[in-house]
Amino acid sequence: MRDRESLLFTDHARRRSQQRGKRREALVLIYRHGDLERRAGRGRVAVRLSRAACAGLLAGGLSKTQVERAARAELVVSELDGAVITVLDSEE
């Protein structure tokens, strides 16, 4: 279960986000506002932002750059404790 207030990254997720050039700010946006989820196996779920969520973030005052960065990433999150397991480039 994701606790949208607390955010825990595994060491692996930190390394992958750095390797893929993903900023923590963008990952926090995905974690807190991600509304598209798909099963990723072994009690994990992949989370990303939908177009509607991106539009809502823009309407809420975030910059286009911030939202675009978040839209280009996907998090794999543990359903057990909400920890971010890894960071992927978004498929869309």
Image (cartoon, rainbow, N blue to C red):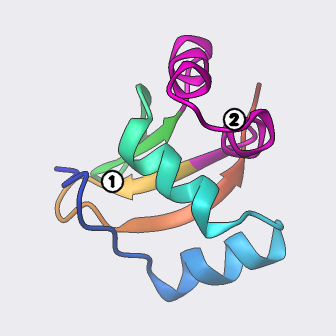
Give the residue type at disc 1: Arg
Q: Which residues are magenta?
A: 49-74
Give the residue type at disc 2: Ala
User: How many numbered discs?
Assistant: 2
Q: Quadrant of the C terminus?
A: top right
Q: Residue at x 52, y 88 (%)?
A: 11
- Residue furthest toward the front? 61
- Secondary structure mostly seen in magenta is helix
Residue 81 at x, y percent in the picture: 18, 65
Q: Residue at x 71, y 45 (%)?
A: 66
Proximity of marks 2 and 1: CB atoms separated by less than 8 Å: no
Does 8 appear in magenta?
A: no
Question: In this rendering, is residue 27 above or below 23?
Answer: above
User: Horizontal placement of 67 versus 12: left or right?
Assistant: right
Specify few, some or many for label 1: CA neighbours under 10 Å numbering under 14, 14-19, or 20 or more. few
Res 84 quadrant in image: bottom left
Front in this rendered view, residue 40 or 4: 4
Lower sequence index among marks 2 and 1: 1
Residue under label 1: 42
User: Horizontal placement of 91 versus 35: left or right?
Assistant: right
What secondary structure is marked by label 2? helix
Residue 43 at x, y percent in the picture: 27, 51
Question: In this rendering, is residue 8 above or below 31?
Answer: below
What secondary structure is marked by label 1? loop
Residue under label 2: 71
Q: Residue at x 42, y 49 (%)?
A: 31
> Mark 2 to mark 1: distance in Å?
25 Å
